[in-house]
């Protein structure tokens, strides 16, 4: 064998390396409630001692909210911010142009980040009303909501 056959191209040593996390993360009570709700076609938030409802709920909140229970919120709400994606990457949730949006669902005090589909990016605006489009088959993940779409006027 020659040196290049044993050490790789250019005389440098190389070895295969696979980065993996060989464990499963267990869900705590907040995320379990949220993802189970999504599976069932509901959006669940955490009600805090001060009356605020946080969606998605967090296991730990640096603001010091004490979670006292879980409540359903609406699957409709208002856009609070957005960014247009004209050319989606393979890793994006949709393969046609869309917006990443922050949506404050009715009944929640915080916004949820998700994909928003519109016919024309010029129609995007802060405060526009949107509704979740649910996946036909759900499995307890954020993609149980395919995307959000505008609520028709009327």
Image (cartoon, rainbow, N blue to C red):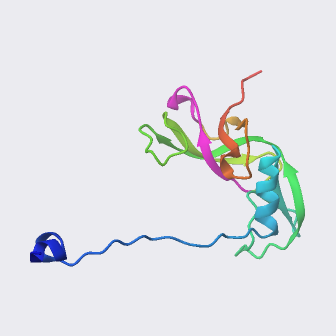
Q: Which residues are magenta?
A: 110-124
User: Where is residue 26, by image quadrant?
Assistant: bottom right
What residue lies at 49% left-to-right and 41% top-to-bottom? 84
Across and down, in percent, residue 105 comes to 76, 46
In the rendered image, which quarter is residue 74 located in?
Answer: top right
Q: Position of residue 113 (x, y in %)?
A: 63, 51
Tell me if residue 93 is in the magenta stretch. Answer: no
Looking at the image, residue 105 sits to the left or right of residue 10; the answer is: right
Placement of 120 over or under 66, stated as above or below = above
Q: Is residue 115 above or below residue 109?
A: above
Residue lying farthest top?
154
Residue at the spot 59% in from the left edge and 34% down from the top edge: 117
> If the image is split into quadrants, where does the C terminus sit?
top right
* Direction from residue 65 to residue 151 in the image, left or right: left
Q: Is residue 123 magenta?
A: yes
List the single residue furthest toward the left: 2
Where is residue 82? Give x, y as percent. 56, 45
Residue 26 lies, with reference to residue 54, above or below; the image says below
Spot the residue most to the front. 1
Task: Please state the horizontal and vertical placement of residue 106, each as a whole percent of the image.
Answer: 80, 45
| Residue sitting at x 62%, y 47% | 114
- Between 51 and 138, the one lying in front of the other is 138
| Residue 127 drawn above or below residue 21 | above
Identity of the residue drawn at 55% across and 26% down: 119
The quadrant of the picture occupied by the N terminus is: bottom left
Judge from the rendering whether residue 101 lies leftward or rightward of residue 145; answer left or right.
left
Q: Is residue 20 left or right of residue 138?
A: left
């Amino acid at each position: 064998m020659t040196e290049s056959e044993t050490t790789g191209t250019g005389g440098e040593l190389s070895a295969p390396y696979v980065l993996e996390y060989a464990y499963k993360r267990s869900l705590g009570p907040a995320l379990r409630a949220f993802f189970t709700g999504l599976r069932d076609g509901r959006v669940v938030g955490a009600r805090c001692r001060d009356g605020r409802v946080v969606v998605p709920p967090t296991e730990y909140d640096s603001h010091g909210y004490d979670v006292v229970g879980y409540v359903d919120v609406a699957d409709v709400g208002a856009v609070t911010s957005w960014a247009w994606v004209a050319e989606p990457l393979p890793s994006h949730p949709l393969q046609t142009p869309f917006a990443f949006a922050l949506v404050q669902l009715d009944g929640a005090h915080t916004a949820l980040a998700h994909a928003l589909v519109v016919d024309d990016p010029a129609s995007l605006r802060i405060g526009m009303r949107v509704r979740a489009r649910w996946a036909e088959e759900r499995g307890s993940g954020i993609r149980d909501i395919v995307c959000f779409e505008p609520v028709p006027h009327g």
